[in-house]
Image: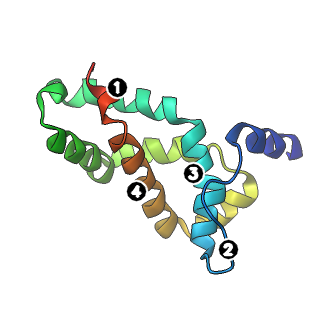
């Protein structure tokens, strides 16, 4: 198990964002765990959303930028099956101790996780032009 943890930390990279004594435990988890996971798996999330567009909205490229941004947010916030798939993609990168912390704080952490994913995809909306 220790080998898995070491490998996960090596693959995910370092903490992203500032951590100080004023940070909440959720913010620390976000910066030490969620942000590195989302960053290291960015290409997977991009591919996943391209697939989502192909299956649900063939005229995505015809939408205005504002509607594209809304589509991204709506897909992640309202499509429970897709949301759960994204959560699973993130949770697979947790260590056991991180998972233990997650299950006791899942509501708050799910909100942070999905908001981070929304912002990540929205900031790369131009990558979905070719879909």
Residue at image coords 31%, 35%: 125
Q: Quadrant of the N terminus?
A: top right
Residue designated by label 1: 51
Residue farthest to the right?
A: 2
Residue at image coords 43%, 62%: 111
Residue at image coords 74%, 60%: 97
* Disc 3/disc 4 C-alpha distance (Å): 11 Å
* Disc 2/disc 1 C-alpha distance (Å): 39 Å
Residue designated by label 2: 20
Residue designated by label 3: 35
Secondary structure beneath dot 3 equals helix
* Disc 2/disc 4 C-alpha distance (Å): 22 Å
Q: Is residue 69 left or right of residue 42?
A: left
Residue designated by label 4: 115
Q: Earlier in the sequence, mark 2 or mark 4?
A: 2
Secondary structure beneath dot 4 equals helix
Q: Earlier in the sequence, mark 2 or mark 3?
A: 2
Crowding at dot 1, Cα within 10 Å, few <14 / some 14-19 / many 20+, comes out as few
Secondary structure beneath dot 1 equals helix
Residue farthest to the bottom?
A: 22
Q: Nearer the viewer, mark 4 or mark 1?
A: 4
Secondary structure beneath dot 2 equals loop
Tell me the quarter of the picture where residue 101 sits. Answer: bottom right
């Amino acid at each position: 198990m220790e080998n898995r943890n070491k490998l996960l930390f090596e693959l995910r990279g370092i903490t992203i964002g500032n951590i100080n004594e004023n940070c909440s435990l959720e913010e620390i988890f976000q910066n030490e765990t969620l942000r590195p996971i989302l960053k290291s798996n960015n290409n997977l999330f991009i591919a996943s959303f391209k697939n989502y567009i192909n299956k649900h909205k063939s005229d995505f490229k015809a939408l205005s930028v504002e509607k594209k941004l809304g589509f991204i947010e709506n897909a992640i916030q309202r499509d429970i099956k897709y949301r759960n798939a994204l959560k699973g993609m993130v949770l697979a990168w947790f260590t056991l101790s991180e998972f233990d912390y997650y299950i006791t704080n899942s509501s708050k952490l799910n909100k942070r996780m999905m908001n981070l994913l929304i912002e990540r995809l929205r900031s790369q909306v131009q990558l979905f032009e070719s879909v």
